[in-house]
Image: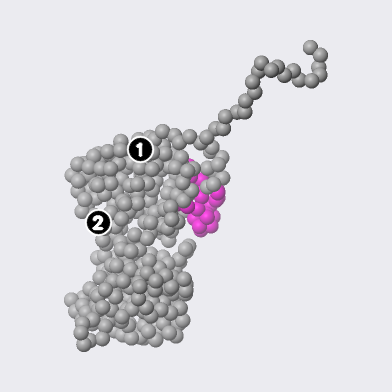
Amino acid sequence: MATGKPFVSSSISYETLEETLDIKPKGESLQVGIPRESALHENRIALTPDAVSVLASNGHRVVVEHKAGDGAHFSDKDYSEAGAKIAYDRKEVFECDTIIKSAPVHEIELDLLKTGQTIISPIHLPVMKSHILEKMMEKKITALSFENLKDDSGHNPIVRSMSEIAGSAVMLIAGQYLGSANHGKGVLLGGISGIPPTKVIIIGAGIVGEYAARTALAVGGSVKIFDNNIYKLKRVQNNMGARLWTSVIEPKILAKQLKTCDVAVGALSSTGGRTPIVVTEEMVSMMRPGSVIVDVSIDRGGCFETSEVTSHEQPVVHKYGVIHYGVPNIASGFARTASQAISNVLMPLMLEIGDEGGLEKLIWHKINIRSGIYLFKGSLTNIYLSQRFSLKYTDLNLLIASQR
């Protein structure tokens, strides 16, 4: 046939190609392992029996290590009745594809990790060690952290719940140590008719500061809040629905207020790295003997120069006659409430992961969860961890796009 114009026959019909859509995959059954925590002061468990029951009735398999819920007063019987399998050997728990922990990955667990596993746990940046990260990278782990996990509204739900618990607990703790039984000055936190109220200073107007202020006001205390973030101070004013005494952190004003206060709360947060020290040793030395400092920021170094990490066995140290409470992870001291709060976030997330056919498929559809991923199939996707340990950083969005 002579070359020329292309041959077009009227008997052939030409049609455009169909558009291909991103079809949601069929859900898969998850295997979830919950080990018993061996970390100091960790009493929480990431899923309650009620949450396990929901997962089990949706066709997922949950393996709980023997006595994992003891710290939060959930028994093995509670879990087995909810449909979980109780494992007496840790190795059996770590055979599961997904591991959910309420404490960071510990060195003794590294050898138990399976290649390609998914781990959902806190990071606890200040105590993270580079060799733990490197081992997890080697084993091609995908890891999601409690601290950076965001919900649809852009908030960090687990951090928020833990902060609410810590903030409310701070005043209960301070009240205990002001009492005569604990060699405090014998003052009732709050106030009664005819006696001036207890003076409470709160440094930091985040969630911890707000809930500490709520509890202090509820028992009748007089509250003064310091923060350098004016937006946070405005938000606390609005959320409280009452006018509060607020100030930016100006050392002279702060020192003057600390001199006469009964309780001082350190509730400053930091996005990365250590909390700034805003109360010097000199300021503490001028405080009244018998007054109480509760430093919630101790998890990230503390904002009082005299603060030091203490334990539940020995919760306080005395310096300049001032009682210092520095137990990290305050929420773990109220383990049952904290476990329920974590479980309320993770249980719906696990159902979503199951419906989507795995965490990797879910983060394709739900962009907000990406902020919580710090390891993706062994690649480090958290810039803070990368800078801190001088490890190679890879952008998660690029990794996900390349998988498609």
Taking the view exactly as shown, the residue that stands out farthest to the front is 10
Q: Which residue is drawn at 52% across and 55% down?
A: 383
Density class for disc 1 (Cα within 10 Å; few <14, some 14-19, many ≥20) is: many
The answer to whether residue 204 is magenta is no
Q: Where is residue 116 in the image (x, y as percent from the top left)?
A: 44, 39
The first of marks 1 and 2 along the sequence is 1
Residue 117: tell me if it is visible: no
Mark 2: secondary structure: helix
Q: Residues within 10 Å of mark 2 (few under 14, many from 20)?
A: many
The quarter of the displayed image where residue 295 is located: bottom left
In this view of the protein, can residue 83 be seen by the observer?
Answer: yes
Q: Which residue is rendered at x = 30% and y = 45% of the image?
A: 34
Quarter of the image with the C terminus in it: top right
Q: What residue type is labelled 1?
A: Leu
Out of 104 and 169, give the one closest to the viewer.
Answer: 169
Q: Which residue is drawn at 60% across and 28% down?
A: 17
Q: How many labels does the image show?
A: 2
Q: In this view, does 220 lie above or below 126?
A: below
Q: Which residue is drawn at 35% across and 73% down?
A: 241
Q: Mark 1 points at which residue?
A: 30
What amino acid type is highlighted by mark number 2?
Arg
Which part of the image, by quadrant, shows the N terminus? Answer: top right
Above or below, 180 against 313 in this view is below
Residue 83 position within the rendered picture, expressed as x and y whole percent measured from the top left: 23, 39
Please state which of residues 59 and 132 is positioned toward the viewer in this rendering: 59
Q: Give the range drawn in magenta.
A: 371-395
Circle number at residue 136:
none
The CA distance from mark 1 to mark 2 is 25 Å
Question: What residue is pinned by disc 2?
Answer: 336
Report helix, strand or loop for mark 1: loop
Frontmost residue, 37 versus 239: 239
